[in-house]
Amino acid sequence: MCDDVAMALLLLEDDLDLGQAVADHLEAAGQPVHWCKLLAQARLASPPELALLDLGLPDGDGLDLLREWRQAGRRWPVIVLTARDQVSDRIRGLQAGADDYLVKPFDLDEMLARVAAVRRRSEPESLVHAGDLVIDLAGHVARRDGQPVPLTAMEWSVLALLAGSPGRVLPRRRIEDRLAAAGLGDAESNSLEVIVSRLRRKLGARVISTHRGLGYCFDDGH
């Protein structure tokens, strides 16, 4: 079922200048950001795709939040952003469940590279199943009843993004940003609605659901 709205990347950072710079850099790269400045705000945030987590916050330590997430079985990737540069600090962060550790001050382009690397390591299995449909994300092919389904570059780009997060509603803006980043989003005749309609005809009407005001979801039947 598609009832989990996939949020942007979560940024927890109380330094206003740094937080703004990080958020702006991520947004410019096509990644929506939900910026929290307090632990209390982050605890109330929707499940993120990935979190960038400062440690020294006005209302506590980011490692406490990270431990809470891991103890509750919340496995989204986490990159720690901190001025604590001792090896022992890094070890504590990794032991608490961090996937990577970035010491301040850091280069914003390096941060983007770390985010991309952590995402790759945390990607789901390359095969996604939905009834008689099998999507091979690594092989860039969709098969229905064992037969390859011919897809355009635009169709595959949208399908791969949705199928990579089955059961989650992905915001329309994020999908359009992916198309634009790939140089596939200019032609008016290839609007997102048209692409989704073509995918439904080729793959089955129930595979992709529309959530008005939110976005689209790939339904794998679970």
Image (spheres, rainbow, N blue to C red):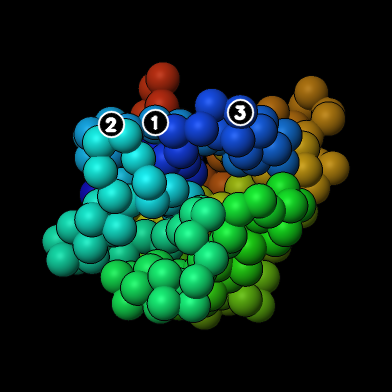
Q: Residues within 10 Å of mark 3 (few under 14, many from 20)?
A: few
Contact between labelled residues 2 and 1, with CB atoms less than 8 Å apart: yes
Frontmost residue, 26 versus 193: 26
Label 3 SS: helix
* Residue 175 placement (x, y as % from top left): 60, 39
Frontmost residue, 133 versus 64: 64
| Amino acid type at image mark 2 | Gln
| Amino acid type at image mark 3 | Asp
Which residue is drawn at the image coordinates 54% and 26% (left, top)?
16
37 versus 183 height, above or below: above
Q: Is residue 118 left or right of residue 219?
A: right
Residue 22 occupies quadrant: top right
* Residue 90 placement (x, y as % from top left): 45, 72
Residue topped by disc 2: 41
The CA distance from mark 3 to mark 2 is 19 Å
Residue 112 is labelled as none
The CA distance from mark 1 to mark 2 is 7 Å
Residue 37 is labelled as 1
Which residue is drawn at the image coordinates 39% and 22% (left, top)?
212
Examine the rendering and report whether any part of residue 157 can be seen: no
Residue topped by disc 3: 17
Q: Residues within 10 Å of mark 2 (few under 14, many from 20)?
A: few
67 versus 22 height, above or below: below
Label 2 SS: helix
Q: Residues within 10 Å of mark 1 (few under 14, many from 20)?
A: some
| Amino acid type at image mark 1 | Lys
Q: Which marked residue is nearer to the observer: mark 1 or mark 2? A: 1
Which residue is drawn at the image coordinates 79% and 47% (left, top)?
182
117 versus 157 height, above or below: below
Determine the residue located farthest toward the top in the rendered image: 213
